[in-house]
Amino acid sequence: MSGPTVILISGRDPQRYFDCAHCGYVRIHAYAATLAGYDVHVLCLDRNERVEATSYGTVHAVKTKFRMVRQNMVPLHSPVLAQAVEQLATTFGPTPIIIHGFGVWGHTAVHACRRLKNRGMRCVSLVSSYTTYLDESMSQWRGLIPENGPLIAAKTALEQAWISAVISRYELDGYRNADRILVNYRTVEKLIKFRFGADLRCDVIPCTIEREFERQQSDACRTSLARNSPPVILSIARHNPRKGIDVLLHALQITKQSGCLFSAHLVGGGPLLDTHRRLLERLQLSDCITIHGRVSRVDDYLDNADIFVLPSREEQSGSLALLEAMRAGVACVASGCDGIPEDVTHKREAWLTVPGDAASLAEGIVSLVKDKSLRERLALAGQKTFEHRFSGVAFVKVLGGLYRELVENDRNHCRWDDGESALNASDRAPFQVPMAARLN
C-alpha cells in the first residue's frame, strides 16, 4: 500500500465508458491521487462483479441488477455502493480513509463515511461537482429546438421532473454533509449555493485533462501548430441540445456565405447526431463539413486542426474539450458561457462569442479563418495558459495537498472558509447570459 487510502465513487464504470465525461473526470482524479502517493480504489457498478488493476488504481465493479440510467437510479444504487465501500474499507486496517464522490455520488460518499464512523474508523468525505444535476437537465430543456422532435422533449421533461422530485434530495445530503466540496469553477459554486444553501463553502481547485496522464502521449503536439490552406475547423462535442451543434452549423453556413474557404470536422456522438446530419444536408454544407460521430481517438483531429470551436449554449462549468485544444496549440473560438470566461480571456487565449448566437459565432470563426497571425497568437497564448494553470503537475500538487490536509486534520467539519465567493455582476464576462435568468 503506497499511502493513505482514497476511495473514489464513480457510479459508472471508468474502464468501460471512455467517451463519458463523468468517467473521464473520475479517472483524472484517480491518476492524480495515484501520482500523489495514495492507495487509490475506484468503486463503480456493473452487471458482473470484478476487481481490476489499472494505471490509476484498482477498479472494483460492484454487481447490480438495476440498469444504469446515467445517475437517475441513485436511490437504488447508492446503498449498494455504500455497503461495498464499508466492506472494502474493513480490509485496510487502521489507515485513514478518504471517500470521494462525484456529482450525485457525493451522497454515497457521505453515507459510506457515516457507516464507517459508526464502526469507529477514521474517514472523511468529499464531493466534487461540475454542475448540479437539475441545472444540467434544465440546460438540455432550454436547448431544445423544434427539429429535436417530441420524443426527446418528452424524455427531457420526464427526467427533469424525476431529478427535481427525487435525485435533488440525494444531492442535498451530499453537499450539506460532506467534509469538503470541490469545484473547478466559481459558476458551479454559485449553482450549488443557489440550489442547496448559501452557507455552503466550496473550494475551487484547478482542473486538467486526462491526456496529461497518458504516458504514450507525445508532448510534440504542444509546439506544432497546424498550417492548412484552407484552414481546418474542428469541434468536439456531444450532439445534445445544450452543446449547440445546430448553432455551429448555422454559423458555418454564414462563414461559407461570406466567401471564406474552410473544411470542418465535427466529432462526437449523442442523441441528436442524425438530426444534425439532416440539418447539414438541408443547409447544403456537405461539401465542406463532415460529421464523424463518435471516434476512438481525437488526437489526429486535434493535430491537424487550425481552429477549434466550442458552440455550447450552456456548460455550467468549463469544457475539457477546450482545454484539450489549448494544450494541442489550436486557436479557439468559444461560447462565453458559464465557466469558459474563467479559463480564457476574449482575444487573448480565445475568441469568445455570445452563447446560442450563430452570427456572433460566425464572426469569431470568420476572423480566425481570415487572419493567420491571429490564429497563431491565440494558439500560443492558449498553450502558455494551459501549461501555467491546467497542467497535470499542478493538479497533482493541489489534489494531493488537499487530501494530505484532510488526513492530518481528521475531523468532521473541515471546510475552508474563504469568505463569500459568489460572482458579482462586475465579474461576469459581457458575453455571458446572466445566470440569474436561468436559476428558476
Image (tube, rainbow, N blue to C red):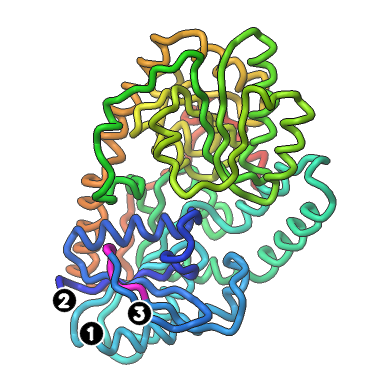
- Rendered image: mark on residue 51: 3
Task: Examine the rendering and report whether any part of residue 440 can be seen.
Answer: no
Indicate which label's residue lies in the foreground, 2 or 3.
Answer: 3
Q: Where is residue 204 in the image (x, y as percent from the top left)?
A: 36, 48
For label 1, count other residues whose C-alpha is less than 10 Å away and answer few (under 14), some (14-19) or many (20+).
few
Amino acid at circle 3: Val
Indicate which label's residue lies in the foreground, 3 or 1.
Answer: 3
Quadrant of the image occupied by residue 66: bottom right
- 376 part of magenta stretch: no
Name the residue tied to disc 1.
92
Residue 12 appears left or right of 100: right
Q: Distance between the residues labelled 1 and 2?
A: 9 Å
- 58 part of magenta stretch: yes
- Point out the tag, 3 or 1, that comes first from the N-terminus: 3
Q: In which quarter of the image is the N terminus?
A: bottom left
- Point out the tag, 2 or 3, that comes first from the N-terminus: 2
Secondary structure category for the residue under label 3? strand
Residue segment shown in magenta: 55-59
Q: Position of residue 351 (x, y in %)?
A: 48, 21
Q: How far apart are marks 3 and 1 (CA)?
A: 16 Å
Secondary structure category for the residue under label 1? loop
Quadrant of the image occupied by residue 177: bottom left
- Rendered image: mark on residue 1: 2
User: Of helix, strand and loop, which mostly describes the magenta segment?
Assistant: strand
Q: Residue at point 71% right, 62% down?
A: 159
- Rendered image: mark on residue 227: none
Marks 1 and 2 close (CB-CB < 8 Å): yes
Q: Residue at point 66% right, 23% down?
A: 287
Indicate which label's residue lies in the foreground, 1 or 2.
Answer: 2
Q: Nearer the viewer, residue 159 or 417?
A: 159
Q: Residue at point 49% right, 44% down?
A: 317
Q: Position of residue 83 (x, y in %)?
A: 43, 87
